[in-house]
Amino acid sequence: MNEMKNKNQEQPKGKSEELSKDKSSVYSASGVNIDAGNEAVRLMSAAVKSTFNKSVLSDVGTFGGLFGTEELFKMKKPVLVGSTDGVGTKVKIAAEAGIYTTIGQDIVNHCIDDILVQGAKPLFFLDYVASSKLDPQMIADIVGGMAKACKESGCALIGGETAEMPGVYMEGEFDIAGTIVGAVDEEKILPKKNIKEGDLLIGLASDSPHTNGYSLIRTAFKGVDLNTVYPELKAPLHEVLLKPHRSYLNAIYPILQEHPEIVKALAHITGGGFIENIPRVIPAGLVIKVKKGSWPVPPLYPLIQKLTGASGDEMYRVFNMGIGMIAVVSPDMAEKYRELVGEESWIIGKLEKADNQTQKPVTILE
């Protein structure tokens, strides 16, 4: 958004205006349309501004986003947490379907969940959208989705970049990325150091594959019309596959603040699934036992496995299999956590002592 400000608006009329128009038309002929960029900014501005709060000190179109630090002073010892990510080849599904209103929600919520696992709440978000040709309405739909997700999580969308790059992206192709900055009080950083044998793993449901495994998904449904309704899915394929990545902030963050003794760690089940992500928050000397069948696996995953021939273990390494966030809690805190989280949850496994206390943690599917 910042970089797409119309820099020609204040030019004096006359010879310089004619020169500007001539150059603009030559530039447009080369594949970059400045006017389309300005129109995209106009269309997205209201959505972006709807995310602003009292900490935002700049407007749409400035060279950099300004964000006040008063929220940080409410913490004893504030620590900033940053994360950058993308949504992978889910953009290919969005482009094929011609639906761009949800993909922006994906990137924001993915980033929010990534910093939530360290106990942080989001402060502000910066986006990057690149395409072969700039379609103002498409860009506005994408950024509108980002703004929706930001607003729902109290996160300000303070800037970004919209890039038109013919020759880099094939016709009809686009990509998005985002950077989030949040904050956590140092004493509340996750994971904690008291994780031990016997602690339980409690899972919360995902809404879709979220933003991972879409290369395998595209293989599974290659050549299939995205309007197809598989009996087990009960909805058009594009609707199932483009359902946004959910944010767990509003379900979990209040617990972290009001009952910091309950949650010892959180694991966001993203790329790498159960196999790669849970060990990232578990100390050495422990084995992670996950009990398959302890939660309902959505029908999309058995369908993908059937169509691709992927093994069961590979499915749990690629996909979230219906579980998007896992909390590590002690057995005596499990029911309290499940009550406070305010939605259905499942005890899906536990931590056991490894034979070698220096052994790195591994996930075992039972």
Image: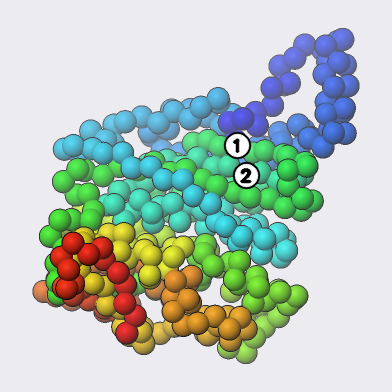
Q: Nearer the viewer, residue 363 or 113?
A: 363
- Residue at 87%, 27% (x, y): give it: 26
Q: Quadrant of residue 181?
A: top left
As helix, strand or loop, the secondary structure at mark 2 comes to strand
Marks 1,2: beta carbons within 8 A: yes
Q: Residues within 10 Å of mark 1 (few under 14, many from 20)?
A: some
Residue 172 position within the rendered picture, expressed as x and y whole percent measured from the top left: 76, 53
Residue 323 appears left or right of 361: right
Identify the image quadrant of the N terminus.
top right
Report the residue at 67% width, 38% height from top: 163
Which amino acid type is shown beneath numbered disc 1?
A: Glu
Tag 1, which secondary structure?
A: strand
List x then y, in percent, for residue 328.
Answer: 23, 67
Residue of label 1: 161
Q: Is residue 234 left or right of residue 156?
A: right
Number of marks in the rendered image: 2
Q: Report, in whole angstroms, how far the alpha carbon at label 1 lies from the one at label 2.
A: 6 Å
By what rule are the colours in the image chosen?
rainbow
Q: Is residue 105 above or below residue 243?
A: above
Relative depth, front residue between 31 and 219: 219
Percent coordinates x, y for residue 72 in the rendering? 26, 35
Instruction: Mark 1 or mark 2: name the one nearer the start of the chain.
Output: 2
Mark 2 = which residue?
129
Q: Amino acid at mark 2?
A: Val
